[in-house]
Image (tube, rainbow, N blue to C red):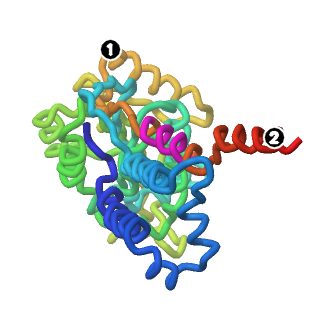
Amino acid sequence: MEFVNPYLFWILLVPFVLFAFLISTNKERLSRIFDEKVLTRLTASSEGMPLRLRNIIMFAAIFFMIVALARPVKELEDKVVKVQGLTLLTALDISGSMRSKDVYPNRLAFAKKKMNEFFDAMPSDEIGVVAFAYSPFVLAPFTSDKETLKMMVKGVDDSYINMGSTDFLALGELASSLLEKKNPKILVLFTDGGDEKAIAGFADVLKANKIDLYVVLVGTEKGAPVIDENGKPIMQKDGTIAISQRNDTLGLLAKENGGAYVIAGPGKEDIENLAAVIKGKYKEQQQGEVRVKQRVEYFYYPLGLGLFLLLIGLSSFPRFKSQKKASGKDGGKK
């Protein structure tokens, strides 16, 4: 048997022993400290029960209550619980091309909307969120609280957008670190794509770490001008407007490695279909194991005994012999 709160036992035991000693051995000195009425209640009267016995019962009651406060328990073996669901890492593209307005209101806002739809389609799964462009960073750790995830994604606005080139290699290294102890390892990108040169090292990192890739592509094949932070089109060196088109190379990479991709549309069917594919592929796999500590509580035994003794100690029992003698005397007088 063990105590959950052993410190309470030792903290309360010392004043209890001191108090019991003073009550039992030094009533006169104690009466100088406590009010007479308080002292009378603490020691109780001797009516129907010897004072010493009543005090012993009261002290025993207090002792058992202290033991109950310390919470005695019997520790059992931990119970291993299999947790259903998957752990997924989602990544939001915040590169400069995500300001393009070939989808309403722009690619970034549209990708955020699709992420929220994906969260709704995976209600019981743990999802983490990172943002990536030149340097990736964690927006939200793995959690099954989808409302918190939506709130974190909502906070990503145009000020997050990085006009530098997208570093997919850095994204792959961050994803491999975050998914290191996960099984299976799933990465879902929300992006307007990347060319073969940009994702060459990214593919190697995914294969080396056995990360399954799924991609949600936003934007159109026709494309739209790349816009700066002031809302103006960016000009190229030759004086023409820079145009950003959706690049499906990432989607093809995902498909080649056992994953899948969808081109984001105005409805929810695309995201629902992607979620169905992911759930279908990993339906036999668990999210992991959770160890739950098991114990048997025993505090109610000393608590019940303490309350019972307290009831006895505060009760008064009539003296039957005295009553009989008194009644005999009264009868004699008659």
Question: Circle 1 is placed at which residue position?
Answer: 284
Magenta residues span: 301-310
Q: Amino acid at mark 1?
A: Glu
Labelled disc at residue 332: 2
Q: Residue furthest right?
A: 334
Magenta portion: prevailing SS class: helix
Nearest the viewer among 155 and 255 is 155
Q: Is residue 178 visible?
A: yes
Q: Looking at the image, how many numbered discs can be counted on the residues? A: 2
Of the residues under marks 2 and 1, which one precedes in the sequence? 1
Q: Amino acid at mark 2?
A: Gly
| Spatial separation of the CA atoms under disc 2 and disc 1 | 95 Å
Query: Which type of secondary structure does the marked residue at label 2 adopt?
Result: helix
**Above-or-below relation of 247 to 62:** above
Question: Which residue is located at x 25 percent, y 36 percent?
Answer: 1
Q: Quadrant of the C terminus?
A: top right
Where, by quadrant of the figure, is residue 320 drawn?
top right
